[in-house]
Amino acid sequence: MMKHFITLFFLSVFSFMNAQTLVPYRDKNLWGYSDESGNVKISPKYDSVTFFETKFTEENVHRFAKVNDKGKYGLIDEKGKMVLDAKYKMIDIDRGEYGMSVIVQNENGKFGVYNFNTLLIPKNLIKSN
């Protein structure tokens, strides 16, 4: 068991160290991402973006960033693919005792949670008070 954990740890560290770092990049009023050398990797098309977050799981390393597209928030991966569609009024990333979770709120004020430990997508949103 310990040997398996050590192998996964070193694979994760190696993968993390070899990953390119993407930074927010602005062209006029739109945001995208470039590498550290200024080469555009995700074309500017968002109203705002955040830096990429990293979440380690036993199987993989997940990187994602929050983007604002016409007043709606979503998450993208480092290739620009939507992880959570930009349809939420609010997205908050929580690093609590149960791991990293994403809390979402839709236009009707209902909340849901996307948990990166169990990879649950918020299908049923809980009614807010």
Image: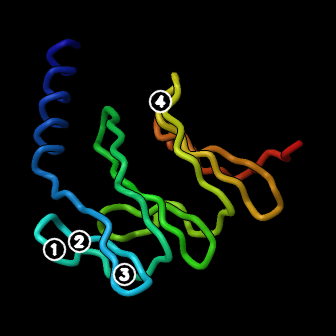
**CB contact under 8 Å: marks 1 and 2:** yes
Q: Quadrant of the N terminus?
A: top left
* Image position of 77 (left or right of 6): right
* Image position of 125 (left or right of 25): right
- At label 2, the amino acid type is Ser
Q: Which residue is labeled 2 in the image? A: 34
**Crowding at mark 1 (Cα within 10 Å: few <14, some 14-19, many 20+):** few
Q: Which residue is labeled 3 in the image? A: 44
Task: Kindly report the distance in space between the C-alpha atoms of the residues bearing marks 1 and 3.
Answer: 13 Å
Q: Residue placed at 58% from the left, 65% from the top?
A: 73
Q: Which residue is labeled 1 in the image? A: 38
In terms of sequence position, does the residue under pointer 2 or pointer 3 come before the other? 2
**Residue 20 in the image: x percent, y percent?**
16, 58
- At label 1, the amino acid type is Gly
- The answer to whether 124 is drawn above or below residue 73 in the figure is above
Task: Kindly report the distance in space between the C-alpha atoms of the residues bearing marks 1 and 2.
Answer: 5 Å
